[in-house]
Structure formats: C-alpha cells, structure tokens
Amino acid sequence: MTASDTRVERRAAPKPARIPLGDRATYASREGRRAAGFTLVEVLVALLMMALLAGLAWQAMDGVARARDDSRQIIDRTTRLATVLAQWEQDLQGVIDTEAVPAIAFDGQTLRLTRRSERGVALVAWSVRGGRWQRWTQPPFVRSGELQEAWLQSQQLQGTEPGHLTLMEGASQWQVYFARDGLWSNAQSTGNLQLSGQPVLPNQPPPSAPAGSAPSGAASAPLPTQTLRDALPDAVRMVITLDGKTLTRDIALGPAGS
C-alpha cells in the first residue's frame, strides 16, 4: 500500500458529529438523566395513574358485591313471601264453621278465623300493626267454651303475646274483602244471614248414663237454639302494602268451611 492510498483511506473515514458549543451542556444533562433513571415528576405521574386505576377497580368490585347482596336480599324476601302466602292459603282453605264463634271475621286490623286441625279446631289471627305483618295462633281446642273464651281474648291482642310470629316487615296497611254470590264486598259489612245449626265442638263432655236408665233413643234431646249469623264467604281477597308495593291475593275457601 502506498502513501497516497493511506491518505485516501484517512480522508474517507467518517468524522464524528460536532456538537455546537452552546448545546453541549444540554446534551450532557440529557445523557445524565437517562443514566440516573426517572425524575420525581415522572414517578408522581405514574403513582397517580396507578391510584386512579386502583380506585376504578375498587369501585367495580364494590358494585359487584353490592349487587350480589341486593340480589340475595331480594331472593330471601321473595322466598319468605311465598312461604307466608302459602300459610295464608292453607289457613283459608282449612276454615271450618264451628257455630260457636264466627268462622272468619275482620275488624279492620285483625282477621280471625277458625280452621280444622288434627287435634281439634285452631284459632288463627292475622294482623298488621306497627309495620309488621303478624300471625297468632294457639293450640287446637276441643270444647266450644274454651274456643269462645279464646275468641274473646283474641280481640284484645296487642302483638306481643306468646304465639305471635312476625312474618314480614314493611307492611303499612291492608284490607280484606269477601266474595258472596260472585260479588266482592268489604269484609266489615254485613253479609248474607243464615240460621245457625248444631255446634261442631261439644260444650262439655256428655254425662255417663246411670245404670237402669232408659236408652238414649227413648228420650229426645233438647234442640239447640238457632240464631241468625253471617254466612261464610265463597272467597277472600287480601290487599296489603309491603315496602310501598301493593299485593293482591284471592283465595277460595276450602270444602271444610261449608
């Protein structure tokens, strides 16, 4: 290689870029920042973005949890209401007229009824008081005198006596209607009158016949006194307000009431 060739190669080699004298300080500071890491402002911006994302994620999770709790409460309340309505229907379809007390009566606050049970006749009272829908009952009766006494006591119920069960909360008001001959009327109005017959429950145990007495068929028993009383309705309509929503339910009385 000759000297002239060496001079040509030296001339062809690229020369490093020259930085103006005024920009050298800026270039050096940029290179220093890149080597040192993020600035405080960049870190604060990143933290702010992470906090915003975390807040949005928390709101989403909280909304899902609240929706789940609300759905569970709605399901539980619907299930409870279905159970209460099933008990209401069961009580009405088991109504029986004992001739000792009214089979079913409504005074504007409490609905009282007598229904057949396996051990006798049960007295049941449904009422709405203090925002609560309640049901009260006592053990079945087998004597008409006991049933009449319990019926009188049920007219003084305050909602705190033993036997009261709170069925639903949020009940504001309710009304009951009776259907007779295809027409609905207020349960507190007088319905069709009919003559009372033989009581279903005895008032007291029958006395034992003394020895040597005449057969029971020889002497005629005294006839019961007949009085006019309201006939049983064909169906019962309940209109009740629960949590601001009106619920209407029509139930036909069962064959036990006739």
Image (tube, rainbow, N blue to C red):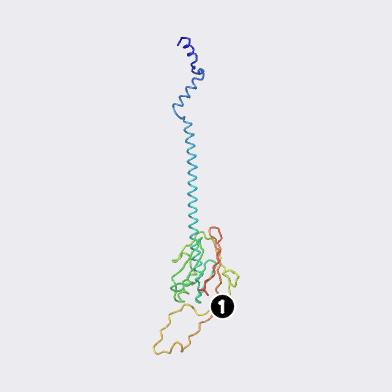
Above/below status of 138 relative to 210 = above
- On the image, the x and y values in percent for residue 193 come to 57, 76
Above/below status of 220 relative to 13 = below
Residue with the most extreme top position = 3
- On the image, the x and y values in percent for residue 198 come to 50, 80
Q: Amino acid at mark 1?
A: Gln
Q: Nearer the viewer, residue 74 or 133?
A: 74
Tell me which corner region of the image, top left, top right, bottom left or bottom right, holds residue 143. bottom left
- On the image, the x and y values in percent for residue 88 come to 50, 66
- On the image, the x and y values in percent for residue 60 come to 49, 45
Q: Nearer the viewer, residue 16 or 125?
A: 16
- Sort mark 1 into few (<14), some (14-19) or many (20+) by Cα contacts within 10 Å: few
Q: Quadrant of the N terminus?
A: top left
- How many numbered marks, from 0 up? 1
Above/below status of 57 relative to 253 = above
Residue for point 56% across, 77% down: 194
Residue with the most extreme front position = 1
In the rendered image, which residue does mark 1 sit on?
194
Residue with the most extreme right position = 183
Which element carries disc 1, helix, strand or loop? strand
